[in-house]
Image (cartoon, rainbow, N blue to C red):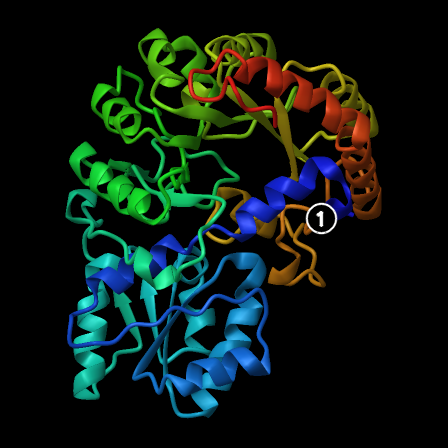
Amino acid sequence: MGMSLPGLRSRANAIAALPPLGLLTLGALTPPDWDVTLHESPAVTDDLVQEILNDHPEVVAISALTASILDAYELCDRLRAEGLLVVLGGLHVTACPEEAMLHGDAVVIGDGEVVWTDVLRDAERGRLRERYQNTRPFELGAAPLPRYDLLGRATRPRYTVQTSRGCPFACEFCGASRLLGAFRTKPAERIGEELDAIKAIDPHATIELADDNTFALGGAHDELLDVLGASGLKWFTECDWRLGENPQVLVRLADAGCVQVLVGIESLVHEASGMGAKRASIARMMDGVRAIQDAGVCVIGCFIIGCDGETHESIDRLRAFLLDDPCGDVQLTLQTPFPGTGLRRRLEHSGRLLADRDWSHHTLFDVTYQPDAMGVDELQSAFNGLLGDVFDRVGHDRRRSIRRALWERHPSLRRETT
């Protein structure tokens, strides 16, 4: 359904084509006497398995998000049956290491950069341990230049650069904010080197910052904006609505190349724990949205459906709001209890997780728990209906018109019409 709606199709395609930054970074940390190849695939196929086997690897490193972790486990099992050593890592594995150990020769818990050379050294000696866990968070100042060359010759719709890791907030539903340690930022000089490397591949690249909450700490962020602006590249990031109350950043945002920001508004009426300073009235948040867009930067308003207290009436109110809201684009997802989150712990403790919904249902578009005020099928049907109304052709065209009007004022987009 989502791929048939014009308002969802382009964003889904862009996400699917994002380079796997974590694996490119591990590739850069691999000693020069190792050969490295990268294999990307939307599914586990015989061709993928054979492609990997043809490289005769000593070690295969696999990373996957929760919704695709069962496919990753299948790939692990098939490669191990062929006698290959398999190492698993990523957010899901960090949250569920015991589960992952059933399918890998080793698992990496936490920041992979800290232990990757240990993994390879132990593999060379035939002494691979079952688990590797960093004893300290990885300092982003030590981040290597990712192996963008592993992506091949074809350019990507967007390239990923990480300027910070984690988030200072602890929103109950967020699976990324605390699993990998405290909030950290990368030095601007290092960011500039990565941008230069991407420009060497594609001089007109668009950058997606792989941050959980850029500008989260407030302040002017002059060094970051300087290096992004000097690159001459367009970029997109995720932040919270408080950006709209930060005039020091707003006055420079468009000139620095920012064209879009995804802003977590979350809900018109329901509040999640752990949001801290992100928590505010919808009126204040929308004032922040308008301020960002007045600066010539499009806001993708992000809303979560299915929080406790959600009813047909609250979804209808959201529908009416979204059919006339000021955002240049919208993202709608279902509340999803990802492993490692406070939300999952709370729903598990109260017996509300659905036993028949495995990890493949954790897509942000499937109900995986018992809502407190609606039936499971009721919530799924109401959500699907909301998607259909908000992302139909009329809604898509209205938001595209908003974006065009915004970008006519943008210094690097005045001539663009899409």
Query: Would residue 241 appear left or right of 305 to someone viewing this image?
Result: left
**Image coords of residue 71 (percent x, y):** 57, 70
**Image coords of residue 405 (percent x, y):** 60, 13
Q: Quadrant of residue 334?
A: top right
**Image coords of residue 174 (percent x, y):** 48, 40
Query: Please, is residue 144 above or below residue 277 in the view?
Result: below
Query: Please, is residue 389 above or below residue 157 in the view?
Result: above
Q: Residue at x 80, y 41 (%)?
A: 384
Q: Residue at x 63, y 61 (%)?
A: 360
Q: Quadrant of residue 274?
A: top left
Q: Please, what secondary structure does the residue beneath circle 1 have?
A: loop
Q: Which residue is mark 1?
A: 367
Q: Quadrant of residue 285?
A: top right
- Disc 1 residue crowd, few under 14, some 14–19, many 20+, Cα 10 Å: many
Query: Please, is residue 285 above or below residue 80 in the view?
Result: above
* Quarter containing the C terminus: top right
Question: How many dots with numbers?
Answer: 1
Query: Would residue 138 appear left or right of 415 to someone viewing this image?
Result: left
**Image coords of residue 138 (percent x, y):** 21, 50
Badge 1 amino acid: Val
Q: Residue at x 59, y 52 (%)?
A: 348
Residue 336 shows in the view:
no
Asked whether 138 or 154 is in front, the reply is 154
Residue 259 shows in the view:
yes
Asked whether 385 or 356 is in front, the reply is 385
Query: Would residue 187 appear left or right of 220 to someone viewing this image?
Result: left
